[in-house]
Image (cartoon, rainbow, N blue to C red):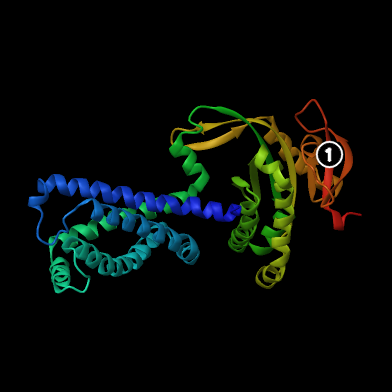
Amino acid sequence: MLSPRTKRNLSRILPFGIIWLLSGWVFLIVEHAAAGGPDGFPSTVIRMDFKIFMFSSLALAAVGLLVGMVEIAYLNDRLARKSFTKKILYKLLFYTLALSVIILITYPAAASMDFQTSIFDRRVWDKYFRFLTSVTHLSTMVQLGVALGASLFYAEISENIGHGVLLNFFTGKYHQPTEEERIFMFLDMKSSTTIAEQLGHIRYFELLREYYADLSGPVVDYRGEVYQYVGDEIVLSWPCEAGIRDNNCIRCFFAMREALRKQSGRYREKFGLAPTFKAGLHYGKVTTGEIGVLKKEIIFTGDVLNATARIQGLCNTYDVDLLLSSDLINSLDFGPEFQARPLGRSELRGRKEGVELYTVRAGRDFS
């Protein structure tokens, strides 16, 4: 079984391979149409047969997947603070050099298949050197550049609006309003106003950026989805089945708390304090769909969001870091790992009916 983080990375990498493969096929069709058939191609073009077509398709998909892996594992983190334009320019420069090396490898291989001879045959390398100074080389670089630009544009859009949201837009999953059951977690940084006054706006923003980054790993590991960032508050969501399975929504809370604890020394050294948070969880039915004209978004509407926000707001009243509704508690099966403690019934502002509240702690920490 693949971990949620591995599955997420694979789902982010796969579109790179698809984009490169489809763009290669489009260029192949356009070239054949422009040349009027095989006889219209210059001598530097490798004549296409089924064997070479399959080799080219696999090579394009492999290069696309390689680009995706480099993006996600290496370049994204190192260029995270660059502007959109600078990111694209730096990446284009990097990949242009890399693609030149790839052409050096793949063109002779394809030429040897065309001649049905060894890659070390002199005819292969004569054709390759003619190719380097031909319009075919320019055409190939344009093709690769378009594929690269399209895949990098996809990567940036995906990073900015979220991979899951982008996928839902493409598939049209929420083009029509849909009713579904979801778990929500409203997570709020403690003493955020005091911290902001202490650090100033710029330093506080830097703290938030690192705070969000440290919380992201556990969210992915426990199948959560970031619905919104609202100042110092994060709204997380799970489809009910995913959040209840293996107590993912609860495990996520404790994993995020542990992630911040491990980095507390770094925060104190850099900012003079270590951030902590409190959270409220609840579940219920919401209506989900695309909305907006000037800016499209996928939003959730329903009483469950207001109720979850109110539950989170009661953490200070009960002097706990985690509050859950009885509805959610009754759907979870903790076993010995976690223990729930009832806190009584509370009225939620804006609701006629009150809700039974619980706090949860890891079994070994409960007292």
Residue occupying image coordinates x 22% and y 67%: 108
In the picture as drawn, the residue positioned furthest to the right comes out as 367
Q: Quadrant of residue 43?
A: bottom left
Observer able to see residue 295: no
Determine if residue 221 is in view.
yes
Q: Which sits in the foreground, 39 or 183?
A: 39
Q: Is residue 97 above or below residue 320?
A: below
Q: Nearer the viewer, residue 201 or 48?
A: 48
Residue 114: x and y in percent read: 18, 60
| Vertical position of residue 27 compared to residue 78: above or below | above
Q: Is residue 214 left or right of residue 366?
A: left
Which residue is painted at 31% across and 47% down in the image? 22
**Tag 1's secondary structure?**
strand
- Please give the count of numbered marks on the rendered protein: 1
Query: Could you tell me the amino acid type at mark 1?
Result: Leu
Give whichever of 142, 32 is nearer the camera: 32
Image spot of residue 178 (x, y percent): 56, 28
Figure quadrant of the C terminus = bottom right
Q: Write down the residue under mark 1.
A: 357
Vertical arrangement, residue 287 with respect to residue 167, above or below: above
**Residue 34 at what x, y percent from top left?**
12, 47
